[in-house]
């Protein structure tokens, strides 16, 4: 497979961003879009010059011309489409948060592994060139022994109970939407914590609007992380080591620039970022016959899903 023929499931806000990134995907082509509504599918297809439009997710999954499906519905609605795609033998790239529950994540992982079908969470941060460079710097020992990570993803969103961000039935809340980025970043560099202390507050719809968490790892390493819809903030990240530190400039999940602080003269590097890098990576994995990504393996997705569930369990219960 040299060119992967991709379809988008869920023609919403994120899908539009992804459609605009496809011209930069050298090993893939966007050939179809699916929606619950034929009219919405057609409108999205026309807007983004996509050849085929399907008015049901079942019809999209059944199309033999489609090689792989990018799933961009709200998180709780990822699962059914993911399972149907796997049953049809189609590789999937599933938006973050992968699902809204640990159980759903486990079901998708089990199905993908049993069918030997590629599945990956669309945690695009890990594929942005700035984060690729951070991985290299850490591996080279540029900041010595990594001792901790500190950061936030604070992105104000006006409260609107009809928006998926605030609707519990659509997986709303700051933990699954923004927290997944800070938690996945820490998981990528520090692994699975053995101590989790979370605090936060809830909004009238019952979803959490903000949280902070302290994570503890073996040998005294730690991460302090936060995310919020309720405040304006920079979205910075810092990796602290025994011989220096790396500042990841806002917003860290794009990693547009990093500064390496070691010795007396800081070095700054700037990078491209975008959704094309994760899609290109999936195409490379498929060309190599892989069923999981070595950069965003399903075990990492499950670990982060468990962490999000633990953070949510420690926040005050919803008031209604
Ligand atoms: N990587 C990133 O930077 C990024 C940024 C934003 C969002 N996301 C992720 O992308 C996913 C979608 O977010 P979004 O902001 O694009 O959401 P959105 O604008 O609300 O769009 C979601 C789409 O899903 C479809 N859908 C299917 N079943 C649905 C249901 N039961 N209720 C509502 N919609 C349903 C809808 O299309 P039809 O009604 O036409 O079927 C809708 O257009 C989320 O998982 C989110 O976390 C990622």
Image (cartoon, rainbow, N blue to C red):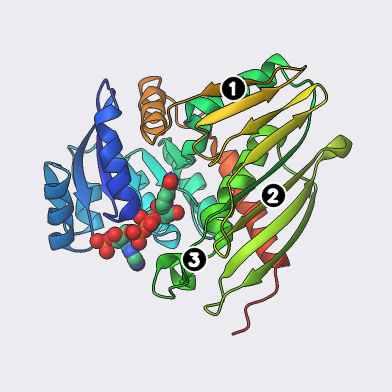
Quarter of the rendering occupied by the C terminus: bottom right
Q: Callout 2 environment at 10 Å: few (<14), some (14 to 19), or many (20+)?
A: many
| Horizontal relation, residue 3 to residue 184: left or right | left
Q: Secondary structure at mark 1?
A: strand
**Alpha-carbon distance for marks 3 and 2?**
19 Å
| Residue for point 49% across, 72% down | 168
| Residue for point 58% across, 62% down | 231
The answer to whether 158 is drawn above or below residue 249 in the figure is below
Query: Which of 283/320 is in front?
Result: 320
**Alpha-carbon distance for marks 3 and 1?**
36 Å
The answer to whether 55 is drawn above or below residue 25 in the figure is below
Number of the front mark, 1 or 2 = 1
| Horizontal relation, residue 92 to residue 152: left or right | left
Q: Which mark is residue 268?
A: 1
- Residue at numbered disc 3: 172
Q: Position of residue 316 (x, y in %)?
A: 70, 73
| Horizontal relation, residue 34 to residue 43: left or right | right
Callout 2: CB less than 8 Å from ligand 1:
no
Which mark sits nearer the N-terminus, 1 or 2? 2
- Residue at numbered disc 2: 225
Q: Are marks 1 and 2 in contact (CB under 8 Å)?
A: no
Q: Are marks 3 and 1 in contact (CB under 8 Å)?
A: no
| Horizontal relation, residue 222 to residue 251: left or right | right
């Amino acid at each position: 497979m040299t060119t992967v023929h991709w379809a988008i499931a869920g023609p919403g806000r994120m899908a539009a961003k992804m459609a605009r990134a496809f011209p930069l995907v050298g090993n893939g082509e966007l050939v179809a879009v699916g929606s619950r509504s034929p009219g919405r599918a057609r409108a999205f297809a026309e807007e983004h010059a996509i050849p085929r439009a399907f008015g049901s997710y079942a019809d999209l999954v059944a199309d033999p011309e489609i090689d792989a499906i990018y799933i961009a519905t709200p998180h709780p609605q990822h699962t059914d489409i993911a399972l149907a795609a796997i049953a049809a033998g189609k590789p999937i790239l599933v938006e973050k948060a992968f699902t809204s529950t640990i159980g759903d994540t486990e079901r998708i992982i089990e199905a993908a592994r049993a069918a030997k079908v590629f599945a990956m969470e669309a945690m695009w941060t890990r594929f942005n060139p700035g984060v690729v460079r951070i991985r290299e710097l850490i591996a080279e020992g540029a900041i010595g022994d990594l001792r901790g990570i500190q950061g936030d993803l604070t992105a104000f969103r006006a409260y609107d109970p009809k928006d998926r961000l605030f609707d519990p039935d659509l997986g709303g809340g700051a933990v699954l939407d923004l927290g997944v980025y800070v938690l996945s970043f820490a998981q990528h560099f520090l692994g699975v914590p053995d101590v989790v202390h979370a605090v936060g507050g809830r909004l009238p719809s019952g979803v959490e609007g903000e949280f902070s968490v302290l994570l503890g790892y073996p040998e005294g390493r730690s991460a302090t992380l936060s995310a919020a819809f309720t405040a304006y903030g920079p979205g910075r990240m810092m990796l602290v080591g025994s011989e220096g530190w790396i500042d990841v400039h806002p917003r860290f999940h794009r990693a547009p620039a990093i500064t390496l602080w070691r010795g007396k003269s800081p070095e700054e590097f700037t990078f491209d970022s975008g959704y094309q890098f994760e899609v290109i990576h999936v195409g490379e994995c498929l060309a190599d016959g892989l069923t999981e990504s070595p950069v965003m393996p399903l075990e990492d997705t499950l670990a982060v899903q468990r962490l999000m569930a633990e953070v949510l369990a420690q926040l005050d219960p919803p008031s209604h």
